[in-house]
Image: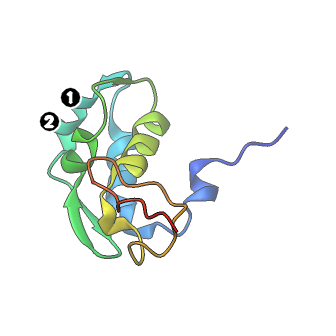
Amino acid sequence: MKFITHRAFYSDMTMWTDAEKAFDAQQYPITAEELIEAEGDLTLELPNGTETLGDALRRSAPETFQTAEDARLTAYACVSGKAIGRKGYSDRDPVCMGEDGPEEVSF
């Protein structure tokens, strides 16, 4: 069985180069708060703006990351709507963490 790693799946996310290095440079396990303290000011370049790594990680539940991959995937999952294309383009996409979605419409 072959697994897709973050590097294969997220190969086009070159705007995260500094974040990738920051994740790999940490000693694991590490708590989210420790990671925010160490690298929280790091700016993430997103398609529709920027935000800090700390902003993204604060949207997740407090946790301890066992590996750089755990921290990386949590950050990917917690970036704001600035990381997506046109908002509201698909009614099937989940709302970003910490944001309110559109109200349901009944036809």
Position of 68 with respect to 82 (left or right) is right
Residue 34, label in figure = 1
Image height of 69 relative to 22, above or below: above
Residue occupied by mark 2: 37
Between 102 and 17, the residue placed more toward the observer is 102
Disc 1 + disc 2, Cβ < 8 Å:
yes
Position of 43 with respect to 19 (left or right) is left
Mark 2: which secondary structure? helix
Q: Picture quarter containing residue 45?
A: bottom left
Image height of 5 relative to 8, above or below: above
Quarter of the image that includes the N terminus: top right
Between 57 and 85, the residue placed more toward the observer is 85
Position of 55 with respect to 67 (left or right) is left
Mark 1: which secondary structure? helix
Please state which amino acid type lies under the numbered disc 2: Glu
Q: Residues within 10 Å of mark 2 (few under 14, many from 20)?
A: few
Which residue corresponds to the image point at 41% horizontal and 41% vertical from the top-left? 74
Q: How crowded is mark 1: few (under 14 residues within 10 Å), some or many (20 or more)?
A: few
Where is residue 87 shown, x and y percent of the image?
A: 38, 73
